[in-house]
Amino acid sequence: MLKRISTLLLVTLILFGSLSAAKRPKNVIFLIGDGMGMAHIYATMVTNGNKLELERCKHVGYSKTYCANRFVTDSGAGGTALATGVKTRYGMIGMNPDSVAVESILEQSDRNGLATGIVVSCAVTYVTPATFIAHQINRKMYEEAAADYLKTDIDVFIGGGRKYFESRKDGRNLIQELKDKQYQVAFDLDEVKKINSGKLAGLIHEDQPPAMPERGDLLPDATMVAIDILDNNKKGFFLMVEGSQIDWGGHSNDIDMIVREMLDFDKTIGKVLDFAEKDGNTLVVITADHECGGLTLVNGNMNEGKVKAYFSSKGHTGIPVPVFAFGPGAEEFTGFMENIDFKGKIEKLLKLK
Ligand code: MG
Ligand code: ZN
């Protein structure tokens, strides 16, 4: 009897142990839909036959996006909050309000031996990706942001922005410097897709990649290449993926562009969730840096998959943005959060020092 009880106790302990161990992710994939509010998501859902891949995330919350000096933030301060856990001044990149550089979750992951990556549908030197790797007082310092990539050991970065690496005022050829640091440098998506190990700099457009549909599958395909490479690291990885141009559809008050860019982002989310589901050790977190356009759906037709959009702004608005999470630790990303809470939560889950 005693033996049976102790066996039962042992089994319970093992089960409990493996359950609590399963709660900690090894990898984190952080997806940011720039300018993506709830109406952007719902407009796309309706247009897409009342479904989206991101609905597979059962943990949902809200993120408050205001920055240190303004109610309505930009992608500089918004990205810096998500990346570094600090509310900073409008337009700043990876710095606190006193213009002091602060470490991003990507840099911290790198310092802790994780593999790291950035995949975006804008130039890699543009605002949101820059907040994860650069430290500059102004979001328009693209050449400086390019040089900041060389200061890190990031394993994979894919997007546009080639010219900021090779046609520079300071005369430096960062493409050569990347090669000297053992990076494989690829200038188109087909080249990118051939690489599955080592370090990769994919600079597949001179500046900003075109909008959808001209861009093709840059975002979903490059994201899967990055995951393939980063997953070689036994200690795990941190990957940031941005659907960069959803925001630009908001600025132009163009509902069709928003839906096209959102569908591209959602396709990427679907592929990421497929990986995370199979892997079992990957936490996926999806959010936005701010809303854009003040988008309202004043009417629509579910059967026809149509919405009637009304925009109240040509810029960003201050409304909280939705958060979706999937995988071990996903339950941490529910309810109302500050945009500076993500870094600490991820840091804790990955046990970063
Ligand atoms: Mg952005
Ligand atoms: Zn914007």
Image (cartoon, helix red, strand yellow):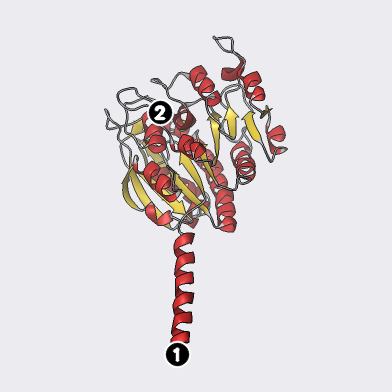
Estimate how packed mark 1 is, as few (under 14), some (14 to 19) or many (20 or more) residues with alpha carbons within 10 Å. Answer: few
Q: Does dot 2 land on a helix, a strand or a loop? A: loop
Q: Mark 1 highlights which residue?
A: 1
Identity, as a three-letter code, of the amino acid under mark 1: Met
x then y, percent, for residue 124: 54, 28
Identity, as a three-letter code, of the amino acid under mark 2: Gly
Q: Quadrant of the N terminus?
A: bottom left
The one of 94 and 3 positioned closer to us in this rendering: 3
Q: Quadrant of the C terminus?
A: top left
* Front disc: 1 or 2: 1
Q: Mark 2 highlights which residue?
A: 94
* C-alpha separation, residue under disc 1 versus residue under disc 2: 62 Å
Q: Which of the 4 image quadrants contains residue 166?
A: top right
Q: Residue at image x 36%, y 35%?
A: 81
Whether pointer 1 and pointer 2 mark residues with C-beta atoms closer than 8 Å, the reply is no
Q: Which of the 4 image quadrants contains residue 159?
A: top right
The one of 17 and 35 positioned closer to us in this rendering: 17
Q: Which of the 4 image quadrants contains residue 71?
A: top left
Q: Residue at image x 70%, y 38%?
A: 193
The one of 176 and 139 positioned closer to us in this rendering: 176
The vertical placement of 240 against 149, above or below, is below
Q: Is residue 88 left or right of residue 263?
A: left
